[in-house]
Image (cartoon, rainbow, N blue to C red):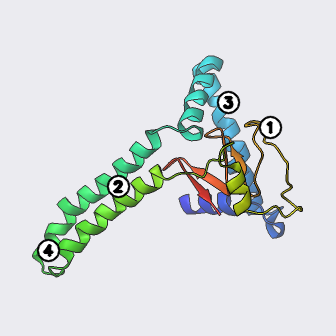
Amino acid sequence: MLALGLLLFLCGPMDSTRSGLLARGYIALTQTLPGLSMQAMRTVLGERGTRGVMTVADWTFNKPNPLVQIFYLSIVTGAVGFFYVGVWPYVYAAKLVSSVHTVTVPAIIVLLYASYAAACLADSGTVTKDNCDAVAAAYPYDNALFHAGVVCDTCKTVKPARSKHCSMCGKCIARLDHRTTYSLFIFKL
């Protein structure tokens, strides 16, 4: 059921399935179900409670905050702990691994945490008045999609080519693709 829901959500109604079962499932998953959930929440919590829940949800998933990072690290740490307590002793006792694994497995786990920290702490490519000229020189305007002299309505800085304003962090980002709440990291093309 979860796989079907994921398929419907990711694929959506394609031209070949616009009026078929997949299209109806997609509409149910993305429009009907959220609408019914909001209606039920209003019935149970009232308008004020629903606004409060939606404010917390918006802060949790659409604003930079550490809650999702803590949740992600809790899951990863729990999985690593389960591996060392519930799996590793049996694999090691059965001599299914060599002594090399006693070094490489912990090293890989350390690299897992280090790469996550590096992604969380990396510079996102923020465009400021100070570095705007350098960023603009790195990515030339093509005068088709990106034109010189365009100013960001929010930041009031000149927008270099391929930069976009990130609504989550409130800054213009060079080569912005999307931001993920798992690391508060901006993916760039």
Residue assigned mark 4: 92
Earlier in the chain: of badge 4 and badge 2, it is 2
**Is residue 151 among what the camera can see?**
yes
Q: Are marks 2 and 1 in contact (CB under 8 Å)?
A: no
**Which numbered mark, 2 or 3, is in the foreground of this view?**
2
| Side of 90 relative to 56 (left or right) | left
Residue assigned mark 1: 153
Residue assigned mark 2: 76
**Which numbered mark, 4 or 3, is in the foreground of this view?**
4
Earlier in the chain: of badge 1 and badge 4, it is 4
Amino acid of disc 3: Gln
**Which numbered mark, 1 or 3, is in the foreground of this view?**
1
Residue assigned mark 3: 39
Between the C-alphas of marks 2 and 1, the distance is: 40 Å
Locate residue 1, reporting x and y percent. 55, 59
Amino acid of disc 1: Asp
